Image: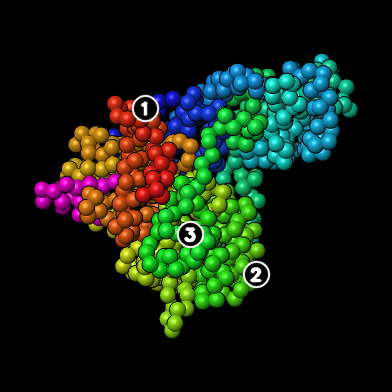
Amino acid sequence: MTKPEKHNNSYINREISWLQFNARVLQEASDENVPLIERLRFLGIFSNNLDEFFKVRYATVKRIVEAGKEGKNQLGGIKAKELLEIITQIVIKQQSESLEVLKNITSTLEDENIYIIDETQIDSAQHDFIKKHYLQNVSPALVTIILNDLVELPNLKDSAAYLAVKMVISNDEKQYALIEIPKSINRFVELPKQGNKSYLIMIDDLLRHSLGDIFNIFDYKSISAHMIKITRDGELDFESDLSKSFIDKISDSVKHRQIGEPVRFVYDKTIDEETLQYLMAKMGIDDTDSIIPGGRYHNRRDYMGFPSLGRTDLLYDKIESLPIKGLSLEASIFEAIAKKDYLLYAPYQTFSYIVKFLREAALDPMVKTIKITIYRLAEISHIASSLINAAINGKTVTVSIELRARFDEQANIDYAQQMEKEGVQLIFGVQGLKVHSKMCVIEREEGKKMKRYGFVSTGNFNESTAKIYTDHTLFTADQRILKDVNKIFNFFQTNYKIFRYKHLITSPHYTQSSVYKLIDKEIDKVKNGNIGFIRLKMNSISSYKMIDKLYEASREGVVIQMIVRGICCLIPGVEGMSENIEVISIVDKFLEHSRLYIFGNDDNAKVYISSADWMTRNIDNRVEVSCPIYSEDLKQEIIETFNICWNDNVKARLLNASQENEYRKNNSQPVRSQFAIYDYYVKKLED
């Protein structure tokens, strides 16, 4: 994998660290031990991640350059202009590596009698099928733009792929056109099987095969088509129009994103120079943008949807999500959690418990109120339908829905409008803060008193992602915790007040100071001759303040173990700074998403589940919740599963200053943590 330059003695640049995370995803696509079709899907994830990186992170750095600033303090000591150049070089190399990976996978697919053919390999039988498929399904969906010097080029869609077509009409006359690759049609067309051989053709090549039909009105001598793609700045710009509602402002901003400033232009490197220069001039692309030569195909994110072709042997075995011992989907959730706390660890255990909790609340006559935060919902959401059901049944339902959840804004707007129509009370977050916490509290009338039940989670309440994201959810009737949860909903409605919380750690007001105190206690243990021990699991760490505090703890002798999936600006293992810190990253079948903080050893550990990574935005600019685990059994369960992850020596990569993403290898028995955790929960059911 590409090895970046190290620019700062104390921190790794955030953008470079993110690119090295994406290199770990590419490693999964390269790994011959990963099932073949899953490797293609990892290639799709790599490409999709890169698209989002350019829309958000690259675009942010580019804005710093355009504002005439260096941005060194924001960017870990690297000048913004220099960083853009470094990013472009890393991405060009990674793109080249990904093309080699794709070439290898395609060759191996042929060993499995799966052939992805192009327009030059079509036989007569396939020609008839393709002709019919084109006329019936593809042609009606095509958008074809004829270009000439007199007509201004319309704004090309963000992240859409286009075939740039050049027709030579005569020696001096050329005609250019663009064909948008339709998103409404599966990118991979399955052709009729021939014996035991499966054949696919990409829509791109089907269109190349059909160029004569598309441009039959032109009397051309030759015709060629090469793919291009433009990525636009994904930041939302809000109007100051006071007459518009917040929903309208978000909706307008989402539409404007499609015509945002270009930040990356990717093209087929075999395109002729004349056509390339013509297109760049038409689109206003210049050398301030990231211009990346690529292969014949772009938008490889579509490989995430590569068809299975009935070949289950080329996919990961599907796991059946397990039940939680003592918690039944056929009995009252409230009755169970009134007696003790329960912990759900998805996808190892079934997300259905969260839906069951809300469905029960919607039907139970004793339930009076439901309050919940929503960040990202599934396309078809049982969570939303349960909340609507509760409102119809006369409950007071309050939903804090984050309309600024990046790239899910429109979906959240649509659900917000549905819920509002059915009587759900909506809160659109807090001005200047994103609501990223994941929590729910209900009030139930029991005798003459109201009793609270609820849950706090590390993940989004999304049935789709719960199948592939690892997340913890605590179900509780602990009135101490739920009183604090209810205070946060009060803060949403009266955010000019700053509330104090006895049990939860919350952003933006208390996370940094509270975590500092917990770290200081571990430092004090070392000073008193005892062991100081911190274990952390999160998606990203980029806050220099939090990193500096961990460096301080390391210098004092506190042992720190960290599992960080994505960005890690902290440099572990540096003598005199971080020699007591070890960091690993696990990229495997599931996406590691849960955040865990464990302070102290197993006997007296303080354990938290959290929605917050240790990034400046999570500490200072979002509403986040870290929830203590008070049940000794559940604390032990979290520690044991953390330790399983920590002992991974199959899919764990070592994070360090070299950023080479080396796999952790040792002489111990192989531990592939995601598979071992599933076995752990199977055994718990048997005990």
Vertical side of 654 occupied by 466: above or below? below
Q: Is residue 279 left or right of residue 42?
A: right
Magenta stretch contains residue 531 = yes
Q: Type of residue at label 1?
A: Glu
Q: Type of residue at label 2?
A: Glu
Vertical side of 296 occupied by 521: above or below? below
Calculate the distance from the C-alpha at mark 3 to the C-alpha at mark 1.
43 Å
**Which residue matches tag 3?**
328
* Region in magenta: 518-535
Residue 299 seen from this side: no
Percent x, y for residue 666?
30, 27
**Chain-order first, disc 3 or disc 2:** 3
Q: Name the residue at 59% across, 64% down.
A: 386
Q: Is residue 19 left or right of residue 291?
A: left
Secondary structure of the residue carrying numbered label 3: loop
Q: Is residue 432 left or right of residue 584?
A: right
Q: Name the residue at 57% across, 60% down.
A: 383
Percent x, y for residue 478?
36, 68
Q: Nearer the viewer, mark 3 or mark 1?
A: 3
* Residue 13 location, quadrant: top left
**Which residue matches tag 2?**
422
Percent x, y for residue 660?
38, 27
**Which residue matches tag 1?**
662
